[in-house]
Image (tube, grey):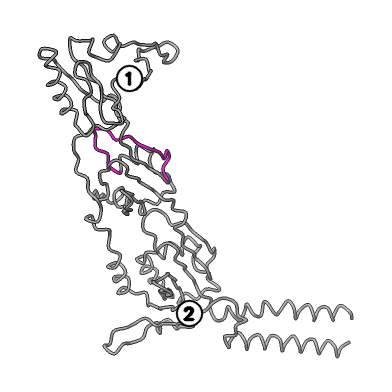
Amino acid sequence: MRGSDQFIAGLFQKGIAWAATLALGGCVLAPGPYMGVAPREDTTTQADGQSAPAEIVQNGITFRLHALNGEMIAQLSAAATPLAPAALPRVVPSAYRVRSGDVLRVIVWDHPELNNPGFSALTTSIVSVGATQSTGMPAATSGGNLDPNGRVVQNDGTIYYPYIGRVKVAGSTVEQIRQDIFKRLDKAVSNPQVDVSIASYRSQKIYVSGAVHTPGTISLTDIPESVSDAISGAGGYSQGADLSAATLNRSGKVYPLDLYAFFYDGDVSQNIMLEDGDVINLPERRLKKVFVLGEVNKPVSQIMPVGPFSLSEALSDAGGLNGISANASQVYVFRQGPGHTVDVFHLDAASPGMLVLGDRFELQPRDVVFVDAAHVTRFYRVVSQILPFASSLYLGTAAFK
């Protein structure tokens, strides 16, 4: 049995040596990806002396490696230009124009017979409000052109009025309608005192959808409606709203809106005026994630908060670098580029002061942050995988003594 023990012990020692050789040689058995680029060798020098990113092609995908320094952060900040205000459509506020479906209230003073049937006496019903209060409200019955509160503009854009017949009102302002009725009614009634107002706005609507508390339609009135007014009318945006990715759909064309810039930075150019048929959409922020993987204490798939989100914040939210296994000089951010390219930003965080630089690097949705493992950690991992197998053989033999 002793000879067998010596054989197993020798096998155990050889297994460890074999594992160490593979680990130090960069064998594929060592788990985890590795860029294999030294901290100060992630750029090449062009003929003009300017540094250019190194490129690695794998599986048809070109990985472009960039050194994350002050110059690179300045270039990225300059490239991230905000949406030009001129790109957004503009609506000049103007007087409300009546359309089919609106309800007009036309009153001729001292001539109750010309008003809506029953309007002079305002047929009322008692509506209970609480236990002890009541109030008089016009009876809410409708019938074609006549309404308890006014006259409904028909599909052809007209209303009917006594003595003058049908009056074309669609497309006109309230003042234009009043003058038209006055001129035509003056032939039947001497110097009529005509008053025209809109009893109910029904013809023009805007729509608010997405991450708001009460999505739906909002009627346009004689008061101009802005984007912020529409969101407020929909109960405000919910906690999961992606304000920076809001959109306006007007006549089939979609315009981006940065409502974060409006609500938090005071950029009033994003708070444009709305018109009939506009659709405001606030998408949810759940798809705006960043992924922190590798040698961190708590790998996470995290929804980006409202506003800028830096690399240092992402590492901190993941519990920071693993003090035992992490290679602080090998921190990478993978970002999808145009076509089959991936931009890889390399941060050498071996010095704590470099994390200040990381705090200036803003992450984008779907970025992947990866912290590589130290070389010695790879050796320990291989040993930890081989050791249970070898130990079981050794102890299993000793058990037969």
- Can see residue 347? no
Q: Could you tell whether 356 is left or right of 171 in the image? A: right
Q: Amino acid at mark 2?
A: Gly
Q: Nearer the viewer, residue 71 or 110?
A: 110
Between the C-alphas of marks 1 and 2, the distance is 70 Å
Residue 362 x/y as whole percent = 37, 64
Dominant secondary-structure state across the stretch colored magenta = loop
- Can see residue 139? yes
Total marks shown come to 2
Q: Secondary structure at mark 2?
A: loop
Q: Nearer the viewer, residue 117 or 376?
A: 117
Task: Please tell me which of labels 1 and 2 falls first in the chain.
Answer: 2
Residue 298 x/y as whole percent = 54, 63
- Residue at 37 percent of width and 20 percent of height: 142
Q: Which residue is mark 1?
A: 147
Residue 259, label in figure = none
Quarter occupied by the N terminus:
bottom right
Q: Amino acid at mark 1?
A: Asp
Residue 71 x/y as whole percent = 30, 74
Query: Label 2: few (<14), some or many (≥20) within 10 Å?
Result: few
The span picked out in magenta is 211-227
- Residue at 49 percent of width and 81 percent of height: 58
Q: Which residue is mark 2?
A: 60
Q: Is residue 315 above or below residue 13?
A: above
Q: Nearer the viewer, residue 118 or 40?
A: 118
Residue 236 x/y as whole percent = 38, 40
Q: Could you tell whether 54 is left or right of 36 in the image? A: left
Q: Is residue 88 magenta?
A: no
- Asked which quadrant contains residue 133, the reply is top left
Q: Is residue 223 magenta?
A: yes
- Asked which quadrant contains residue 401, the reply is bottom right
